[in-house]
Image (spheres, rainbow, N blue to C red):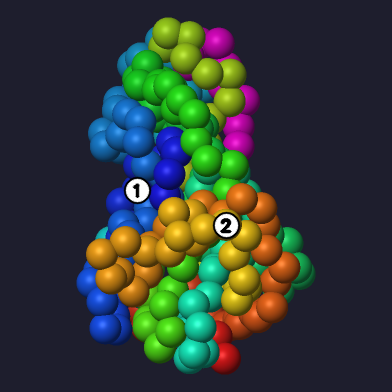
Amino acid sequence: MLGCGPAVEETGTASGSGTSGPSTSGGTTGTSSTGSAEVGSSGDETGSVCPELRNGETPNLIVPVEITNTLATPVYVGYESTCLVDLFELTRPDGSIVDWRGRFCTPTCQEVMAGECFDCGACPETAMLRIGPGATYTYEWTPLEYDLLDVPAECNAQPCSSTCDRRYPLPDGGYTLQIVASTGCDGDGMTCECWDGQDACEVYPWSWPEVTHSASVQFSVPTSGALSLTIQ
C-alpha cells in the first residue's frame, strides 16, 4: 500500500497469465517498528503508565486471503479510502467494524515512545487493486487489530505524536471478511491498467467507481486456513 502506517509486513501475489502483483502491507513507507522498544519497562520512570501502550505480541501466523476474478473483464477492488488500498472490511457478529490495518500515517504507540515518528508526505487520493480476468490475488494477512489511543505526555519521547495505534492479536471469535469491487475505472491507461503484464497491481482512478460486485466469507479466530473469495 501507499502511504505510512504500522510496519507489519504482509505481501500479496497474483496468479494467472502475467507476473506477480503488488506487495500490500498494513502500512508502508516510514520508520518501521521492530516491537523491541523497552520504554516504560519495570524500573523506568514511565513504568506506571507506558506499558499499557506497548504492542501486543504479533502472532506467528499468516492467513492467505485469496481473491479470484472469474469475470472476462478486470475488476477493481477496495473500499473508499485515502492513500491506502482498503482491500477488505472486517466485522464482528454485532456488525462493528474491526480496524485490521491501522490508520494512515499514525505511528504505533511503541514508535511514539521510542521517538520513531515519520513524515508521510503526499499520497494519491484514490488507490484500488486491479485484478485481471481469470486471475487470483493472494494477500498474506497477519490477524491483528488496532486501537487509536491518546499518548500521555510522559510517554512521548520527542514529543512525537499526540495519538498512536496500539497493535494486538485479533481476539478469538467469529468474523466476516467482505470485499467490494467494480468492473469500471474512471481514468486512462496510466491510472487504470497494470504495467508489464501483471495480473494484479495498485491503480489510482480519478474518482471512486460504482460498486458492482461483492463477496464475503465467515471464519473464526484462531484459524490457519486460507480465506477464499470469488468475484463472479
x 37%, y 81%: residue: 136
Q: Quadrant of residue 10?
A: bottom left
Q: Amino acid at mark 2?
A: Gly
Residue 133 on the magenta span = no
In the rendered image, residue 45, in percent from the top left (x then y), is placed at 41, 10
Which structural element holds mark 2? loop
- Badge 1 local density, few (<14 within 10 Å), some, or many (20+)? many
In the rendered image, residue 89, in percent from the top left (x then y), is placed at 61, 65
Q: Give 44 or 97, whichever is nearer the viewer.
A: 97
Q: Give 211 or 63, whichever is nearer the viewer.
A: 211
Residue at mark 2 to residue at mark 1: CA–CA distance: 31 Å
Which residue is disc 1 drawn over? 8
Residue segment shown in magenta: 143-156
Quarter of the image where the C terminus is located: bottom right
x 62%, y 71%: residue: 184
Q: Quadrant of residue 173?
A: bottom right
Image position of 109 (left or right of 136)? right
Image position of 33 (left or right of 104)? left
In the rendered image, residue 17, in percent from the top left (x then y), is placed at 26, 83
Query: Nearer the viewer's eye, disc 2 or disc 1?
Result: 2
Image position of 72 (left or right of 198)? right
Image position of 156 (left or right of 181)? left
User: In the rendered image of this protein, does residue 70 appear above or below residue 136?
Assistant: below
x 40%, y 22%: residue: 118
The earlier-in-sequence mark between 2 and 1 is 1
Which structural element holds mark 1? loop
Which residue is disc 2 drawn over? 187
